[in-house]
Image (cartoon, rainbow, N blue to C red):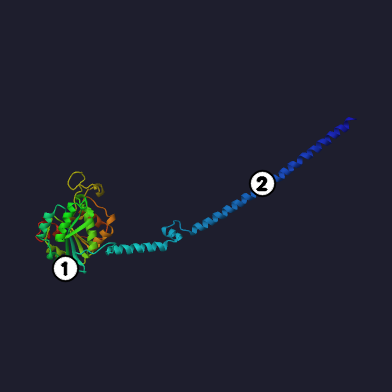
Amino acid sequence: METLPTTSTMKRGGRSKGVQTSKPSLIMAFFSCVAWLYVAGRLWQDAENRNLLASLLKKNSAQRPKVLTVEDKLMVLGCRDLERRIVEAEMELTLAKSQGYLKGQLQQSGSSSDRRLLAVIGVHTGFGSRLKRNVFRGSWMPRGDALKKLEERGVVIRFVIGRSANRGDSLDRNIDEENRSTKDFLILEGHEEAQEELPKKAKIFFSTAVQNWDADFYVKVDDNIDIDLEGLIDLLDRRRGQDGAYVGCMKSGQVITEEGKPWYEPEWWKFGDEKTYFRHAAGSLVILSKNLAQYININSVSLKTYAYDDTSLGSWMMGIQATYIDDSRLCCSSIRQDKVCSLA
């Protein structure tokens, strides 16, 4: 009988302990539910935000161009007007250069009239060719007063030569002395006279001649040929006013690929598998109209030269609207009776 209260007390104590340990569990469960609801709410909100952003991007991308052009970039940077002014300035500069308005550029004293000349003829010569020059002066090329009268008719003739590699040496002094006596030289101050520099010499000649004289035609002549001057003047006069004229004895020919052989072309690989040159005028006598000479003058810095002057000149004519005129009267080695040049 005494054991009954003891048993009852133990049971009550057990129930009391169980009630006390269940309260923290309920609290933890409640906070867990709150935390879960909070995280779920944030995830749902983030998902909604992502959907909203995706829809906005899709809408904007549909209104924007797929490719952003250069013009679009210029519009964004506010440079469209600046670009237009730069282009206009470049066009004005090119026009001014083509018309001879260059810094430090003076009109050559060889022209006796303000009217446009018929032709400027440049006889390309060298330091060791004084005897040839004297022969020409005594044959087809006028000298002294006769040279001035020819200029009054609209034809200027000059021997064309550069400077010595050793500036101011006896070679340069001899040319200066000869020029003081004859006054029939065009001295290319910026060109160094050398056999391998003949293509550059041709380029500088046309560029310099078109700057110094206003003529319909510019003629390059080698000093190994004789000229029927009246025949050449008549040929030029008949073509007066013809723009884009590239006139000469047109030819092609094999590209020599073996170093050491005559007429070797170091850049032979540029001429294709057939190894033949493009169509070009023989270098002995070449005629260019004024606009073609102006083209050489304006683009002188970027024009590529090859091993020889005639092929170099032909390459410059290939990329522009030049009219190729094959005139057999300019084939100096031909047997035609009416040709205007012959081998000297």
Horizontally, residue 316 falls left or right of residue 230, namely right
Query: Could one spot residue 72 in this view of the protein?
Result: yes
User: In the rendered image, which residue does mark 2 sit on?
Assistant: 36
The residue at 20%/57% (across/down) is 187
Amino acid type, residue under disc 1 in the picture: Glu
Horizontally, residue 275 falls left or right of residue 22, namely left
Q: Earlier in the sequence, mark 2 or mark 1?
A: 2
Horizontally, residue 128 falls left or right of residue 16, namely left
* Residue 229 in which image quadrant: bottom left
Secondary structure under badge 1?
helix
Seen from the viewer's position, the closer of residues 25 and 111 is 111
Looking at the rendered image, the quarter that the C terminus falls into is bottom left
Q: Position of residue 26 (x, y in %)?
A: 74, 43
Seen from the viewer's position, the closer of residues 9 and 82 is 82
The CA span between labels 2 and 1 is: 107 Å
Q: Is residue 312 above or below residue 93?
A: above
User: In the rendered image, which residue does mark 1 sit on?
Assistant: 152
- The crowding category of the residue bearing disc 2, from other C-alpha atoms within 10 Å (few below 14, some 14 to 19, many at least 20), is few
